Image (cartoon, rainbow, N blue to C red):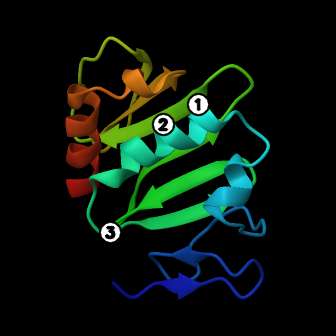
C-alpha cells in the first residue's frame, strides 16, 4: 500500500493530508525503553503472528496499521493498554471497555500486565482486527 508521509513529522499515513496530531515519530524500542521489560514482551507476543504491519511509534505508544489503523498499544504506569478495533462487539475476560463507532466497528480496551494475558483468544482478536 502506498502511504503519505507528513513533511512535518515524517510519519506515514494511509491518506494524503490525513488529519493527525503532528508529533515526531520514534522507534518501538524508544517507546518501550522507559517502561518495564514485560511491556515489550507483551507487545512482541501481540504483534508476532500478524502479517505485514506498519508500526507507527511515538512516545506515547505504537499505532498498528495495515490498510488502516487497527490497534493502539500504549505503555501506562500500571499496565500496557491495548485498544483494538473490531468489526463487531467481542467478549474477552480482559476487556475493560467497549466503545461502538458510527460505522458499526467497536473499539475494545484491554489492560495487560503479564505475557500470559495474551492468550489464544486475544491473539485471534488481533488477527480479526488486522484483517479488518
Front-most of 77 and 39?
A: 39
- Mark 2 Cα shell of 10 Å, populated few (<14), some (14-19), many (≥20): many
Residue visible at 39% across and 39% down?
84
* Other-residue count near label 1 (Cα within 10 Å), few / some / many at <14 / 14–19 / ≥20: many
Measured as percent of width and height from the top left, residue 34 is found at 79, 43
Q: In this figure, which residue is indicated by the disc labeled 3?
A: 67
Of all residues shown, which one is farthest toward the top? 93
Tell me the tag on residue 80: 1
Is the residue under label 1 in contact with that under label 2 (CB below 8 Å)? yes
Q: Secondary structure at mark 3?
A: loop
On screen, 50 above or below 115?
A: below
Q: Which residue is mark 2?
A: 42
Q: Nearer the viewer, mark 2 or mark 1?
A: 2
**Which of the two discs, 1 and 3, labels the residue nearer the N terminus?**
3
Alpha carbon distance from label 1 to label 3: 24 Å
The alpha-carbon separation of the residues under discs 2 and 3 comes to 23 Å
- Which of the image's four quarters has the C terminus? bottom left
* Location of residue 121 with respect to 42 vertically, above or below: above
Image side of residue 34 versus residue 36, left or right: right
Q: Residue at x 56, y 77 (%)?
A: 12
- Structural distance between the alpha carbons of marks 2 and 1: 8 Å
Residue at the spot x=26%, y=64% of the render? 51
Q: Could you say where residue 112 lies in the image, as x and y percent from the top left?
A: 50, 24
**Residue beneath the point at 66% across and 83% down:** 6
From this view, report whether residue 111 is shown above or below residue 40: above
Classed neighbour count for the residue bearing mark 3: other residues with Cα under 10 Å, few (<14), some (14–19), many (≥20):
some
SS type, badge 1? strand
Amino acid at each position: 500500500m502506498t502511504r503519505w508521509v507528513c513533511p512535518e513529522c515524517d510519519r506515514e499515513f494511509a491518506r494524503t493530508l490525513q488529519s493527525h496530531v503532528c508529533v515526531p515519530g520514534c522507534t518501538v524500542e524508544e517507546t518501550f525503553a522507559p517502561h518495564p521489560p514485560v511491556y515489550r514482551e507483551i507487545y512482541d507476543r501481540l504483534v508476532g503472528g500478524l502479517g505485514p504491519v506498519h508500526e507507527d511509534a511515538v512516545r506515547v505508544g505504537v499505532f498498528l496499521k495495515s490498510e488502516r489503523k487497527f490497534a493502539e498499544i500504549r505503555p501506562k504506569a500500571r499496565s500496557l493498554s491495548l485498544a483494538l478495533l473490531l468489526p463487531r462487539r467481542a467478549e474477552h475476560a480482559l476487556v475493560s471497555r467497549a466503545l461502538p463507532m458510527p460505522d458499526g466497528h467497536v473499539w475494545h480496551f484491554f489492560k495487560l500486565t503479564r505475557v500470559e494475558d495474551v492468550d489464544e483468544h486475544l491473539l485471534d482478536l488481533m488477527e480479526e482486527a488486522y484483517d479488518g
